[in-house]
């Protein structure tokens, strides 16, 4: 039996706002979300969604992946196809979510609060006011500095064999960043730079890299000696926060980054973005920038 995606005991307003933020300024995600939650059918296959939205195979899979990563739907196999199951909470709140996703001003005024784990025991509660700018999850394809990755197909290995330092040095070369950043256990991040371009503008970005020393799916507990590397990453004075791993990234990493991004946006009044680069996207970066990653 599928595990429910959302937690009905958590803050209702926060969950609704989170869903709206995932769909905001993402028309393909919006269309796929609407198609999944339209009608009484609990599970929609990839081909169902292609027919309902008019999107092609790749567009449907990319949009649906973002919904799964953000826990708005769950994924399963049906008749040999990737298929997507509704969540009862989001189904009941579909109209509100779509309304907020289409109206940034209304979304900014949505009453809510969030709690962010600041370590093993501490919890920080953040009140969000009307001036709040909702954070945005972006993908490697959305970052102008990595534009060449769009030419590399998505069907790459989920895990790649490359050291953490090699990824960091490759990304530095792609960005044209010449400063040196030493890796040690107490650092807030592995790379900070103002040479990332997104939306046509330069922004300050902080990266955390996890290499092949970690086995299996990446979880927050595997990040840093005390499992607090994501929290320390968000202490940087940055607008874009990136976690890169050579394999699959767990959904709880996404959830924690989303909560921390909300807290960062609420306390700084900045437009905050966050990005996860998993093994597949790392492979795409390596192929798109083979010279910079030393494979020429």
Image (cartoon, rainbow, N blue to C red):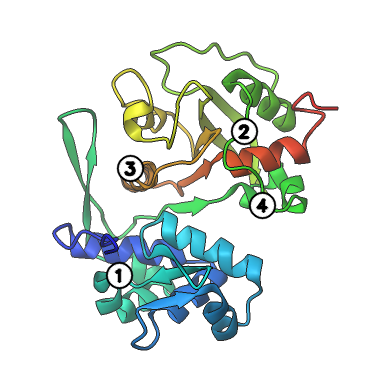
Asked whether the residues under the numbered discs 3 and 4 touch, taking CB atoms below 8 Å apart as contact, a structural biologist would say no
What residue is drawn where x is 80% and y is 27%? 295
- Picture coordinates of residue 4 (x, y %)? 26, 62
Instruction: Give the spatial CA distance, label 4 vs label 1.
Output: 27 Å
Tell me: 82 left or right of 112: right
As drawn, the residue found furthest toward the bottom would be: 39
Mark linked to residue 87:
1
Asked whether the residues under the numbered discs 4 and 1 touch, taking CB atoms below 8 Å apart as contact, a structural biologist would say no
Q: Secondary structure at mark 2?
A: loop
Query: Which tag is nearer the camera, tag 4 or tag 1?
Result: 4
Residue 164 can be seen in this image: yes
Provide the residue designation for mark 3: 256
Provide the residue designation for mark 2: 160
- Picture coordinates of residue 190 (x, y %)? 51, 22
Q: Secondary structure at mark 3?
A: helix
Q: Is residue 143 above or below residue 109?
A: above
- Picture coordinates of residue 12 (x, y %)? 20, 64
Earlier-in-chain disc, 1 versus 3: 1
Query: Which tag is nearer the camera, tag 2 or tag 1?
Result: 2
Pointer 3 local density, CA inside 10 Å: few below 14, some 14–19, many at least 20: some
Mark linked to residue 155:
4
Tell me: 295 left or right of 215: right
The quarter of the picture where the N terminus appears is bottom left
As drawn, the residue found furthest toward the right would be: 296
């Amino acid at each position: 039996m599928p595990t429910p995606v959302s937690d009905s005991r958590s803050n209702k307003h926060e969950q609704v706002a989170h869903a709206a933020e995932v769909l905001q300024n993402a028309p393909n995600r919006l269309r796929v979300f609407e198609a999944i939650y339209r009608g009484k059918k609990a599970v929609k296959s990839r081909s169902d969604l292609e027919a309902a939205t008019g999107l092609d195979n790749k567009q449907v899979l990319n949009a649906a992946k973002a919904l799964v990563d953000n826990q708005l739907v769950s994924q399963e196999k049906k008749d040999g196809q990737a298929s997507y199951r509704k969540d009862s909470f989001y189904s009941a709140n579909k109209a509100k979510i779509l309304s907020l996703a289409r109206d940034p001003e209304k979304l900014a005024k949505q009453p809510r609060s969030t709690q962010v784990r600041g370590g093993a025991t501490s919890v920080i509660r953040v009140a969000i006011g009307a001036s709040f700018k909702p954070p945005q999850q972006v993908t490697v394809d959305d970052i102008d500095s990595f534009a060449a990755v769009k030419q590399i197909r998505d069907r790459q290995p989920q895990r790649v064999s490359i050291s953490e330092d090699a990824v960091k040095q490759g990304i530095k070369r792609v960005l044209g960043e010449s400063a040196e950043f030493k890796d040690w256990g107490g650092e807030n991040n592995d790379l900070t730079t103002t040479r990332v371009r997104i939306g046509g503008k330069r922004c300050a970005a902080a990266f955390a890299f996890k290499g092949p020393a970690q086995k299996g799916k990446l979880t927050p507990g595997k990040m840093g000696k005390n499992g607090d590397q994501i929290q320390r990453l968000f202490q940087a004075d940055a607008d874009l926060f990136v976690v890169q791993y050579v394999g699959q990234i767990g959904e709880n990493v996404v959830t924690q980054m989303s909560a921390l991004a909300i807290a960062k946006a609420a306390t700084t009044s900045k437009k905050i973005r966050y990005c996860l680069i998993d093994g597949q996207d790392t492979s795409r970066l390596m192929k798109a920038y083979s010279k910079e990653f030393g494979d020429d």
